[in-house]
Image: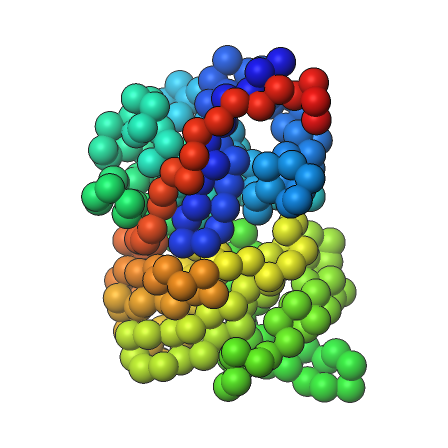
Amino acid sequence: MKLEFAKMSGAGNDFIVVDDRKGFVAEDAGELAKQLCRRRVSVGADGLILVVPSTSHDFRMRYFNADGSEADMCGNGGRCVARFAHERGIAGKTMRFQSQSGTHSAEILDENHVKLMMTEPRAMLLGTSLHMGGEVYEVHRINTGVPHAIIEVEDIENYPVVETGRAVRGHNSYAPEGTNVDFAAVEDEHNVRLRTYERGVEDETLACGTGAVATAITLASLGKVKPPVTVKTRGGEPLEIGFFMSDNGYCDVSLSGDARVVYWAELDLSEE
């Protein structure tokens, strides 16, 4: 079977994106993600994204982590799939699509930038204490389509992100689904530096869209930043987070930044 796909990058998160509106891939998507996302021996990516039909919107997005698990949402993946849909004529420059976390609208801003409207954040819990290895960590929790734990750090460049992230991700407090873990350093009221350990990739990634949104909103709730918030990622591409704060929570949450096609290709799955 020949599989046409796009290798895409969203601020450093990389994805394999497939038009599966005819349903050739969906049944085996988890196993396919594990095969194709392996770095050095296959295409290599943080995740596999399928474009599948929707009866009420332009399309529906399904997202599979590199370990084969299906996630409700991926922010940078959502921006990439929007560009993919526009490039393939599936949707116009503005579109509405579904993920397992809800309905999203997206806009192609220019050649390499896409703005995605996120679902409203939920399940925020500030200032929880997490006991690990004889230390106590202050952790903030929030769900921005997928669960995130946010930890503020001072020396973000030298912080043991993978070691600590793996321990938090697998902590009993987050069982059974686990959590993504974001390590943040506030530069000023509109700028934050961020490193993320992603569940499903089980490693640090160069960027995380839902993590950037989770971090910006959490820090705003703590009174440390104000929208719009520019989140500086490990991959070097900034993400801009927009939102409005009210007594009822947060609304009009947006994620904007780089989303580009690295290359188009065809793969012979019989050789995988």
Q: In the figure, is residue 118 to the left or right of 242?
A: right
**Residue 204 figure quarter:** bottom right
Name the quarter where the C terminus is drawn: top right
x%, y% of residue 219? 41, 74
Q: Position of residue 52 (x, y in %)?
A: 47, 23
Question: At which x and y percent is residue 125?
Answer: 53, 69
Quarter of the rendering containing residue 202: bottom right
Answer yes or no: is residue 199 visible: yes
Is 221 drawn above or below residue 73 in the view shown?
below
210 vs 233, nearest the viewer: 233
Q: Is residue 124 visible in this depiction of the protein?
A: no
Quadrant, the N terminus: top right
* Total labels drawn: 0
Say above or below: 114 vs 160.
above
> What residue is drawn where x is 21% and y is 43%?
110
Give whichever of 116, 41 is nearer the camera. Answer: 41
Outermost residue to the right = 133
Front-lying residue, 134 or 175:
134
Q: Residue at x 55, y 20 (%)?
A: 3
Q: Position of residue 84 (x, y in %)?
A: 37, 32
Residue depicted at x 23% and y 33%: 93
Q: How is the image coloured?
A: rainbow
Judged left or right of residue 220, residue 66 is right
Q: Residue at x 66, y 44 (%)?
A: 40
* For residue 62, above or below residue 148: above
